[in-house]
């Protein structure tokens, strides 16, 4: 049985597909960040201070792991 | 040939438990203490016939302490006469209301119901949740080493039930309490306990919300004062051949090629040993006694990043009347918001609060023998900054003492100012000088979630071979049972590896 010839997509179509995927990823990331930022603004001041207090410590964690 | 098998620096709870367990294993141990008393923050001193505690004022969650004494072929109850405290505490709220919390669950529900029926109804749920987490923690966390991710994995394997409480790791102490209790006065009765880990309720990790429950598992006061616990460990260890030298200060730790070789005393004497256990603050140990040149750059960066826990002061009062209180502990408490305001706008800025909150420990309620007949003792702990703006504690000591006695007389302890016979104020600066606790931080290093477990200075040093840590600044953290647990963790690792 003869294999049906499939036409390979052109280089331009493949590139356009990659661009769309990249843009979609960016959009999802942006939506996620906007969502998180919105959620943060909804928190009370006390919870915000708790999160900021912990976030400020994050850069030190690799060093603390080695003490 | 080294002089000893093991040298232990500091006779605080962690150092003395490590030293005693290692002596019990047949090691030749030398315990060095810079002051004249054992116990560090769990100690007692005498003045004019009154015996005052220096820091800790009760003992709870005693499992690690019982385990330490069992390792010495005895029991905690045999060596120390433990007096149960019931009520577990009483609260003096900002509006003048007093709420007394008894040991029993039913009694606690009844006490809370006088403030809020709704919150009283959820107390059993909170107690069951906190009790479940506490039993998982005690069996797995307090006496196991956590030096890396492998240790963490082993602990989770040993106590997989801990995962059911994962929400406690991302919430704050006050978030957890607010989930259960809605009445601000009920919240006040459990708010102050967050300072037992050196942080206000909005910054203390949710895992410590068990402190609002843990006292219901039992609270005891050791007869003779808090020093009775470390002193019993010392006596057991001396019976097993441990050598103890007080009033002996260590100036530096001898390190060669990233391996300990012993210590140098303040008088220049060198004492050698292949293993050194340090019970002093980890930051002081690495930066002052060892020197940062002996540390890899990442460890140097890490150790400098640690902040001391909150500082406190203690007012020691000998009085000639029976104070109008109803519990060993009376907490002068405040709403969450006021405690947060104190932290951000007072404590961190070096200012004293307008209105105090803290703990009044009536030790003679439990053990009348601590004071002359007919007299009583009150040890009052107030939160306060170490570095004051525009002044210092040496100048503020006397006026602050007078002001505080007056404040207590008009609030939680009526009539106090007319009955004071002996008064002494131990300021954060005194704690720094007497106990070598940097910035008067009696709980060691800060204990938020980014300073816990694998991120806390490891009990087996990752930079210096033969060096082990015990005390409040290593795992599992500050507190009498936890520091004694830290000594056991160090001793176990030495026994297995050295």
Image: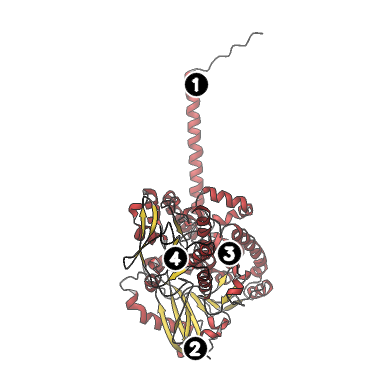
Say yes or no: labels 1 and 3 on the same chain: no
**Picture colour scheme:** secondary structure
Pointer 2 with pointer 4, Cβ within 8 A: no
Pointer 1 with pointer 2, Cβ within 8 A: no
- CA–CA distance between discs 2 and 3? 47 Å
- CA–CA distance between discs 1 and 3? 74 Å
Work out whether residue B250 or residue B169 is closer to the camera in this orientation and state it: B250
For label 3, count other residues whose C-alpha is less than 10 Å away and answer few (under 14), some (14-19) or many (20+). some
Residue B108, numbered label:
none
Q: Nearer the viewer, mark 1 or mark 2?
A: 2
- CA–CA distance between discs 3 and 4? 19 Å
Residue B71, numbered label:
3
Q: Is residue B320 magenta?
A: no
Q: What secondary structure is marked by label 3? A: helix
Q: What secondary structure is marked by label 2? A: loop
Percent of width and height locating residue B115: 62, 74
Percent of width and height locating residue A14: 50, 22
Residue on which the image places disc 1: A13
For label 1, count other residues whose C-alpha is less than 10 Å away and answer few (under 14), some (14-19) or many (20+). few
Residue on which the image places disc 2: B415
Q: Nearer the viewer, mark 4 or mark 1?
A: 4
Query: What is the residue that sits farthest to the front in this orientation?
Result: B1
Q: Is residue B68 magenta?
A: yes
Work out whether residue B90 or residue B83 is closer to the camera in this orientation and state it: B83
Say yes or no: labels 2 and 4 on the same chain: yes
Q: Say which label, 2 or 3, has the lower sequence index.
A: 3
In which chain is the residue bearing label 3? B
The span picked out in magenta is B67-73
Q: What secondary structure is marked by label 4? A: strand
Residue on which the image places disc 4: B30
């Amino acid at each position: 049985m003869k294999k049906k010839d499939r036409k390979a997509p052109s280089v331009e179509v493949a590139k356009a597909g990659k661009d769309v995927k990249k843009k979609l990823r960016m959009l999802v990331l942006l939506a996620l960040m906007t969502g998180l930022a919105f959620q943060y603004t909804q928190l009370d001041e006390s919870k915000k201070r708790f999160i900021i207090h912990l976030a400020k410590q994050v850069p030190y964690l690799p060093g603390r792991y080695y003490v | 040939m080294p002089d000893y098998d093991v040298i232990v620096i500091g006779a605080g709870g962690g150092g003395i438990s490590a030293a005693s367990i290692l002596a019990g294993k047949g090691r030749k141990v030398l315990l060095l203490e810079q002051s004249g008393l054992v116990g560090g923050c769990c100690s007692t001193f005498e003045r004019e016939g009154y015996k005052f505690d220096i820091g800790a004022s009760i003992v709870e969650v005693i499992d690690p302490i019982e385990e330490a004494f069992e390792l010495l072929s005895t029991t905690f109850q045999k060596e120390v006469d433990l007096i149960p405290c019931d009520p577990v505490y009483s609260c003096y709220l900002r509006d003048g209301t007093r709420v007394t919390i008894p040991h029993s669950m039913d009694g606690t529900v009844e006490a809370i119901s006088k403030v809020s029926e709704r919150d009283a109804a959820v107390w059993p749920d909170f107690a069951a949740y906190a009790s479940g987490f506490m039993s998982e923690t005690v069996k797995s966390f307090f006496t196991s080493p956590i030096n890396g991710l492998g240790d963490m994995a082993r602990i989770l394997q040993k106590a997989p039930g801990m995962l059911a409480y994962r929400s406690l790791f991302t919430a704050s102490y006050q978030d957890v309490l607010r989930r259960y209790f809605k009445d601000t006065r009920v919240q006040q009765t459990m708010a102050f306990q967050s300072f037992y880990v050196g942080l206000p309720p909005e910054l203390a990790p949710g895992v410590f919300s068990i402190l609002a429950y843990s006292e219901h598992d039992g609270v005891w006061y050791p007869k003779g004062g808090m020093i009775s616990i470390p002193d019993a460990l010392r006596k057991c260890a001396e019976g097993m051949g441990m050598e103890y030298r007080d009033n002996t200060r260590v100036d530096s730790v001898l390190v060669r090629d990233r391996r300990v070789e012993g210590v140098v005393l303040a008088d220049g004497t060198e004492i050698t040993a292949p293993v050194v256990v340090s019970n002093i603050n980890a930051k002081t140990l690495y930066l002052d006694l060892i020197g940062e040149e002996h540390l890899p750059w990442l460890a140097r960066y890490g150790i400098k990043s640690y902040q001391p826990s909150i500082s406190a002061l203690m007012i020691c009062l000998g009085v000639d009347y029976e104070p109008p209180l109803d519990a060993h502990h009376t907490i002068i408490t405040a709403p969450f918001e006021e405690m947060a305001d104190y932290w951000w706008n007072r404590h961190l800025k070096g200012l004293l609060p307008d209105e105090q909150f803290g703990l009044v420990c009536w030790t003679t309620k439990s053990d009348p023998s601590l004071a002359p007949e007919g007299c009583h003792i009150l040890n009052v702990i107030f939160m306060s900054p170490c570095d004051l703006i525009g002044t210092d504690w040496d100048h503020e000591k006397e006026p602050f003492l007078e002001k505080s006695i007056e404040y207590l007389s008009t609030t939680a302890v009526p009539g106090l100012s007319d009955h004071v016979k002996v008064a002494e104020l131990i300021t954060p600066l005194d704690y720094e000088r007497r106990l070598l606790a940097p910035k008067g931080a009696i709980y060691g290093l800060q204990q938020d979630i980014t300073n816990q477990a694998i991120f806390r200075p490891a009990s087996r040093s990752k930079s210096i071979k033969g060096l082990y840590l015990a005390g409040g600044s290593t795992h599992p953290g500050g507190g009498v049972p936890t520091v004694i647990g830290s000594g056991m963790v160090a001793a176990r690792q030495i026994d297995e590896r050295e």
